[in-house]
Image (tube, rainbow, N blue to C red):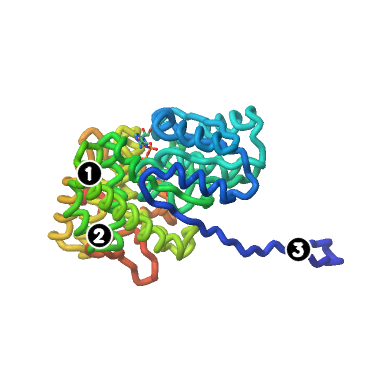
Amino acid sequence: MCYDEAMSNFHVSLKKVVDDSYDIAIGADLFETLKADLCHGLMGKIRRFAIITDDLVKPLYADGIASLLSEAGFETEIFTIPHGEKNKTREKKAWLEDAMLSKGFRRDCAVIAVGGGVVTDLAGFTAGTFGRGVPFLNYATTLLAAADASVGGKTAVDTPLATNLIGLFYQPKKVYIDVKAWETLPERELRSGLAETIKHACMADAAFFAYLEEHLDTLLSVSRPGSAQEKEVQRAVCMHIAEKNCQIKYQVVEQDEKETSGLRETLNLGHTVGRAVETVSDYRLLHGEAVAIGLLFQARLGEKSGYLSADEVSRIKALLEKAGLPTEIPDDIDRETLVKKLYTDKKVRNGAIRFVFQKGIGQMMCFEDGSYARAVSETEVRSVL
Ligand SMILES: NC(=O)c1ccc[n+]([C@@H]2O[C@H](COP(=O)([O-])OP(=O)(O)OC[C@H]3O[C@@H](n4cnc5c(N)ncnc54)[C@H](O)[C@@H]3O)[C@@H](O)[C@H]2O)c1
């Protein structure tokens, strides 16, 4: 600290070297792995865990995790929110905080999020501000959370204006991706999760795109009974998909954790129109369904600018359709409201709507000024609408 006589100015020196590295465990049924990690000191001396989940995931996974950890001598309390995007709000965050406080949770606790992206986003944000920040773990039970939401350290809640506007960059201490949990997912949710997976393939990996074209049916059969051999094949496909998603997402996150260089904006592929459709539909469309519509929208827009060929656009459309995802904006969504909603997108700069685009299949467009997003006029948007 240095003292300036004339102005009584104190300089507070708080340079930090931060290591937020963490592991992602990918496998089938990871309760025991989680328990072993905690027993071996993953969370230091912390013995109290607030398990945050939703009402559908609680009986399937959170209860089991809580009893296993209790048997191992940890103190656990489950906090349950109703399921669904409409509950990823500031109000539910405040409710969770009050509930945790009333149960005596203070700074000496940690949070374990057990569920899909709604739970991991909300629980991560809650952990990031509770007692000015307590550590948290993600136990991801949906394909969407595995592919995207639970990894990368973005936490948030939605507001009436738009999704994910209020939140924190706050990294978990470890992420558990339980591919066996995909077996209990309703088929619509599994399909919805595929949108972010297809997005990753479009962005960064043409071979992965081809793999999805070939193996999608196997993934979609995970909830059906099958022989031991069929189950083994399904498991291998799920593991490969989970691993590829992490690899592609982390190639970006490791270089631009807080979206400072613009590279992380590439993960927003399909989300400009996707998020607008999601909000304007009042969440009737699931996140992945809206992203699927947004993915094809940017592909068509990109085709007009020569970023990808008609044939590549057709392959993207075919893969989204094979995944059972919508590709067209529903007729009952008012186009004018949608265009207005595009201006609430976080990529908007100086009042201009900006899109990120794929370059063919497996690469992203990078523009002359080094940025990955470019301004798109309303006229261009309307030409595809
Ligand atoms: N933080 C990020 O980087 C990021 C990235 C992408 C998406 N997201 C967010 O993720 C959310 C969407 O994620 P989601 O689709 O996982 O949503 P979700 O948490 O709502 O889960 C979907 C539904 O499946 C149920 N469910 C969860 N796991 C289950 C299981 N194994 N078996 C049966 N039912 C199960 C849930 O109760 C819910 O009804 C959105 O809020 C989106 O904004 C965040």
**Can residue 340 be seen in the rendering of this structure?**
no
- The structure residue drawn at horizontal position 74% and vertical position 61%, both measured from the top left corner, is 12
Q: Who comes first in sequence, dot 3 or dot 1? A: 3
Residue 247 place in picture, x, y as percent: 37, 60
Q: Is mark 1 on a helix, strand or loop?
A: helix
Q: Who comes first in sequence, dot 1 or dot 2? A: 2
Nearest to the observer: residue 48 or residue 279: 48
- Residue linked to disc 3: 11
C-beta proximity under 8 Å, tags 3 and 1: no
- Residue linked to disc 1: 228
Mark 1 vs mark 2, CA separation in Å: 26 Å
Q: Which residue lies furthest to the bottom in this view?
A: 368
C-beta proximity under 8 Å, tags 2 and 3: no
Residue type of the residue flagged with mark 3:
His
- Residue linked to disc 2: 208
Q: In this view, does 303 lie above or below 216?
A: below
Residue type of the residue flagged with mark 1:
Ala
Q: Who comes first in sequence, dot 2 or dot 3? A: 3
Residue 374 place in picture, x, y as percent: 34, 61
Q: In which quarter of the image is residue 185?
A: top left
Mark 3 vs mark 1, CA separation in Å: 65 Å
